[in-house]
C-alpha cells in the first residue's frame, strides 16, 4: 500500500538542534524540500541548543496545538565518553513519550553516527534523513486523521 504523502492541508513544525549545526542545517534543508514537494506550505521552524532539548519543545508545541505533526532533527556524533549513548537514547525516549502522551506524531530525524563523515553522508542531497523524517510526519499525520475521522 502506498503511503498518503499529500500534505496540502497539514501544518508541520520542525524542531532543530543547533549542536553540529553544519549537519542539522543540511537536515533542515532536506526536510523543508520534502515538505514543499508534498505541498506543505511554510513549516514552522524552532531552534534548540541540542538533542536533549527536542522533547520538551515538541511537548510544548504538541500541547499548544495547531500542528498535525512535528519533525525533530539533530546530529549526535560519538565522542570519547558515554554521553553519546545517553543523549541519543534519552532524546529518542523523550520524543516517543511526547507522541504517546499527546497523540501528535513526532518524526525522529536524529542522526546517531560514529563520526562527522557519516553524519554528512546522511544529510546530503541524495541521502537525507531530514527529508525521510518529513515524509514520515506527513504519512503519520494523514494516517491518524483517517483513523480518528
Image (cartoon, rainbow, N blue to C red):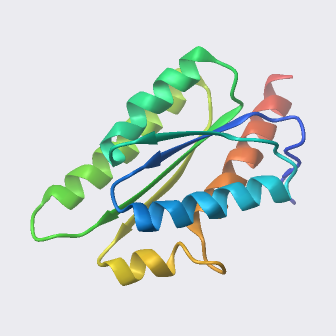
| Position in image of residue 36 (x %, y %) | 81, 54
Which residue is depicted at the point 81% across and 35% down?
Answer: 10
Q: Is residue 148 above or below residue 25?
A: above
Tell me: 102 left or right of 85.
Answer: right
* Between 88 and 116, the one nearer to me in the picture: 116
Which quarter of the figure has residue 23?
Answer: bottom left
Q: Position of residue 110 (x, y in %)?
A: 44, 57
In the rendered image, residue 72, in percent from the top left (x then y), is placed at 51, 46
Q: Residue at x 85, y 54 (%)?
A: 38
Q: Name above or below for residue 6 compared with residue 61.
A: below
Instruction: Tell me which corner region of the image, top left, top right, bottom left or bottom right, holds residue 90.
Output: top left
Side of 74 relative to 36 (left or right): left
Residue at x-position 58% and y-position 77%: 124
Coordinates of residue 112 in the picture (x, y in percent): 36, 65
Q: How many marks?
A: 0
Q: Which residue is drawn at the image coordinates 37% and 41% (left, top)? A: 93
Q: Where is 115 relative to 70, above or below?
A: below
Which residue of the protein is positioned furthest toward the top in this rendering?
64
- Quarter holding the N terminus is bottom right
Amino acid at each position: 500500500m502506498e503511503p498518503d504523502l499529500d500534505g496540502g492541508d497539514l501544518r508541520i513544525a520542525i524542531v532543530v538542534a543547533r549542536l553540529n549545526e553544519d549537519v542539522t542545517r543540511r537536515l533542515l534543508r532536506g526536510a523543508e524540500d520534502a515538505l514543499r514537494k508534498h505541498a506543505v506550505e511554510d513549516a514552522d521552524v524552532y531552534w534548540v541548543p541540542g538533542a536533549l532539548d527536542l522533547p520538551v519543545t515538541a511537548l510544548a508545541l504538541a500541547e499548544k496545538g495547531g500542528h498535525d505533526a512535528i519533525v525533530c532533527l539533530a546530529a549526535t556524533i560519538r565522542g570519547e565518553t558515554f554521553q553519546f549513548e545517553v543523549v541519543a537514547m534519552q532524546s529518542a525516549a523523550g520524543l516517543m513519550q511526547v507522541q504517546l502522551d499527546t497523540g501528535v506524531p513526532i518524526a525522529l530525524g536524529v542522526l546517531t553516527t560514529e563520526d562527522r563523515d557519516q553524519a554528512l553522508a546522511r544529510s546530503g542531497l541524495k541521502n537525507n534523513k531530514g527529508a525521510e523524517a518529513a515524509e514520515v510526519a506527513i504519512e503519520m499525520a494523514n494516517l491518524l486523521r483517517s483513523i480518528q475521522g
